[in-house]
Image: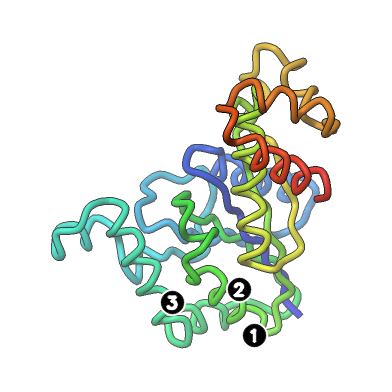
Amino acid sequence: MGYAQLVIGPAGSGKSTYCSSLYQHCESVGRQIHIVNLDPAAENFDYPVAADIRELISLEDVMEELGLGPNGGLIYCMEHLEDNLDDWLTEELDNYLDDDYLVFDCPGQIEIFSHVPVLKNFVEHLQRKNFNVCSVYLLDSQFITDVTKFISGCMSSLSAMVQLELPHVNILSKMDLVTNKREIENYLDPLPETLLPELNQRMAPQFEKLNKSLIELVSSG
C-alpha cells in the first residue's frame, strides 16, 4: 500500500511552504517523501518536484490558446487532469514503490475541493491504485480574527471534508504573522453561547436563525 496526502486550502494559505517544510523535515530525520505539483499555474518551487501537472497541461497555455481567464483556465486544466487519470497519473504512480509517501501540492481555487468533483475523482483513482489517502487543509491564521471570518473558514473546511470524504487535518498557517495571538486563542475551542451573540451583533436581525444553525453546526463538528 502507498500513502498519499492532499494539501488543500485557499490561495495564499501557505500550501507550497508547508510542502517545502515537510520535505525538509523528512529529509532531516532520514525519511523520504515525494512531492507532486498539481497546480498548473505554479512557477517556483522550494522543494524537488517528483511529478508536475505542467508536463500534462499548463494554465498559461490554456489561457493563450482558448482565451480563458485564470479561474476558468484552472478549472479547464483540472478537468483535463481528470480526463487523463488513467494515462498520465497512472504512469506517474507506477514510478513509486508500494510503501512510498506522496504529497500532492494542490491549487488554491476553492471550487476544486468544495464542489467541483475533480479532486474527489482524483482521490478515488488513488484509492483504486491502493493508496491510503488523507487531506491536510491549510487556513491562514490571520483569517481567524473575528467570528464572521471564523465561521467562513469553518464552512470552507467542512465543505472540503464532505466533498472528499477523507481523514482530514486542519492547520492554521502563518501564525508567526499574527500580531495579537489572543484573538486566535478565542476561536481555538469556542463556546456556542459566546459565538452566537457576537455573530448576531455583526449581522442583520433577519439572519439570527441562520446564525444559530451555523453555530450549532460548527459546535457539533
The amino acid type found where label 3 is placed reads: Glu
Give me the residue at 62% from left, 40% from top: 153
Give me the residue at 80% from left, 50% from top: 221
User: Which label belongs to residue 120?
Assistant: none
User: Which label belongs to residue 129?
Assistant: 1
Query: Quadrant of the rendered structure where residue 159 is?
Result: bottom right
Query: Quadrant of the rendered structure where residue 103 is?
Result: bottom right
Q: Which of marks 2 and 3 is nearer the N terminus?
A: 3
Q: What element carries label 3?
A: helix
The amino acid type found where label 1 is placed reads: Lys
Q: Where is residue 215 in the image (x, y as percent from the top left)?
A: 74, 40
Give me the residue at 62% from left, 60% from top: 6
Nearer-the-camera pick, 151 or 46? 151
- Figure check: 129 above or below 15: below
Q: Mark 3 points at which residue?
A: 82
For the residues bearing labels 1 and 2, Cβ distance under 8 angstroms: no
